[in-house]
Image: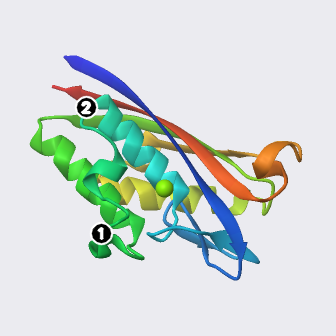
Amino acid sequence: MDFRIGHGYDVHALSEGLPLILGGVEIPHSHGLVAHSDGDVAIHAICDALLGAAALGDIGMHFPDTSVDFKGIDSKILLQRVASLLREKGYEIGNIDCTIRLQRPKLRPHIDRMRETLAKAMSIKTDQVSVKATTTEHLGFEGREEGVSVSAVALIFRP
Ligand code: MG
């Protein structure tokens, strides 16, 4: 069995009045993420972890933010495409773990829906997807509520 791991990291800025979409789920909040796509920083980090594991470049290479095709795109579509690309190369997804760093709002009530949504987009089981959230104790850009960062790891394998 050919096991591989990958890491992904992404940051987006918060701005008032935009929708906050994390892990494919819209979360009620006064601020949302600024981006060319829907700004789903969690999905972007997961895409990069998957692409990294397969050494297939990064999300910016596959879905350039200069392309009108991806303007405002639902990031779940990007994740579906990355999962399909990996399968075309003979890989299966083992598991995903990610950590969302933001000060507010509390994500606990939304975590299970994010896991289900992400798993569905990748065509894997919910128990293969872990989503965690942490504040940064008011430190740094996340703590000042200027932005949200996410790191993700993915294990993939060729049976
Ligand atoms: Mg991004």
Q: Any atom of ligand 1 within 8 Å of the CB at mark 1? A: no
The three-letter amino acid code for the residue at tag 1 is Ser
Counting from the top left corner in percent of width and height, residue 1 is at 19, 16
Residue that badge 2 annotates: 54
Instruction: Give the side of residue 40 with respect to residue 108, left or right.
Output: left
Give above or below for 69 relative to 155. below
The earlier-in-sequence mark between 2 and 1 is: 2
Q: Nearer the viewer, residue 106 or 149?
A: 149
User: Judging from the image, what secondary structure is the residue with disc 1 in?
Assistant: loop
Q: Quadrant of residue 37?
A: bottom left
Residue found at the far top of this picture = 1
Q: Quadrant of the C terminus?
A: top left
**Image position of 123 (left or right of 149):** left
Q: Residues within 10 Å of mark 1 (few under 14, many from 20)?
A: few
In this view, which residue lies farthest toward the right?
138
Q: Nearer the viewer, residue 55 or 96?
A: 55
Distance from the alpha carbon under mark 2 to that under mark 1: 24 Å
Q: What's under tag 2, amino acid-wise?
A: Ala
x and y, in percent, of residue 84 in the image? 19, 51
Q: Is residue 128 left or right of residue 114?
A: left
Q: With 89 as the anchor, is 30 left or right in this view? A: right
- Residue picked out by circle 1: 67
Residue 57 placed where, x, y %? 28, 38
Give the foreground label among 2 and 1: 1
Q: Residue at x 26, y 49 (%)?
A: 83
| Vertical order, 123 against 21 (above or below) | above
Residue at (69% x, 66% y) in the render: 14
Dot 2 lies on which element? loop
| Outermost residue toward the front in this view | 66
Q: Please tell me in which quadrant of the rendered image residue 58 appears.
A: top left
The residue that appears at 44% across and 62% down in the rendered structure is 117
**Mark 2 in CB contact with mark 1 (< 8 angstroms):** no
